[in-house]
Image: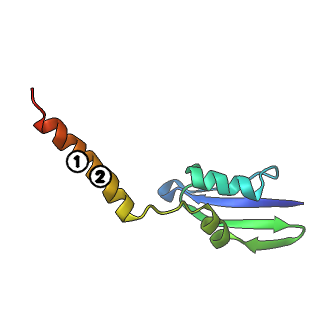
């Protein structure tokens, strides 16, 4: 039997361990990427009688690709250009 324990830290309100034997590694990653799981303290994978800390691995797999600042600047400049065109068009 294999399952994951995801410990979520709510600060002053305490912590919650999400343990669902039906959830797979892929589903844990999807829930982290979607933002359903936030403020994760640790993720343990329990297989047979062994416990392994897989927090770093799963968080790395769930990391969203970073948008390069140059791409963001290009989009912002196109919005600025469109706004400037509207501002200067004949009424």
x%, y% of residue 87?
13, 37
Please rate how many residues cluster around mark 2, counting C-alpha atoms within 10 Å: few if below 14, some from 14 to 19, many from 20: few
The residue tagged 1 is: 80
Q: Decide: is 4 above or below 91.
A: below
Asked if residue 13 shows in the view, the reply is yes
Check residue 13 in the rendering and tell me which mark sits there, or answer none: none
The residue tagged 2 is: 76
For this view, does 9 lie left or right of residue 5? left
Q: In this view of the protein, which residue sits in the foreground, 21 or 15?
A: 21
x%, y% of residue 3?
81, 59
x%, y% of residue 50?
85, 73
Quadrant placement of the N terminus: bottom right
Asked if residue 18 shows in the view, the reply is no
Q: Which residue is most to the front?
A: 90
What secondary structure is found at the residue carrying circle 2?
Answer: helix
Marks 2/1: CA distance? 6 Å
Please rate how many residues cluster around mark 1, counting C-alpha atoms within 10 Å: few if below 14, some from 14 to 19, many from 20: few
Dot 2 and dot 1 residues touching (CB under 8 Å): yes
**In which image quadrant can residue 45 be found?**
bottom right
**In which image quadrant can residue 40 be found?**
bottom right
Q: In this view of the protein, which residue sits in the foreground, 77 or 14?
A: 77
For this view, does 9 lie left or right of residue 51? left
* Residue depicted at x 75% and y 59%: 25
x%, y% of residue 56?
63, 72
* Residue depicted at x 71% and y 52%: 27
């Amino acid at each position: 039997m294999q399952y994951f324990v995801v410990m979520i830290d709510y600060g002053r309100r305490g912590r919650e361990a999400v343990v669902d034997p039906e959830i797979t590694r892929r589903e844990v990653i999807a829930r982290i990427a979607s933002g359903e799981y936030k403020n994760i303290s640790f993720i343990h994978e329990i297989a047979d009688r062994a416990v392994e800390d897989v927090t770093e691995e799963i968080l790395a797999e769930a990391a969203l690709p970073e948008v390069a600042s140059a791409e963001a600047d290009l989009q912002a400049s196109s919005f600025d250009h469109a706004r400037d065109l509207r501002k200067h068009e004949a009424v």
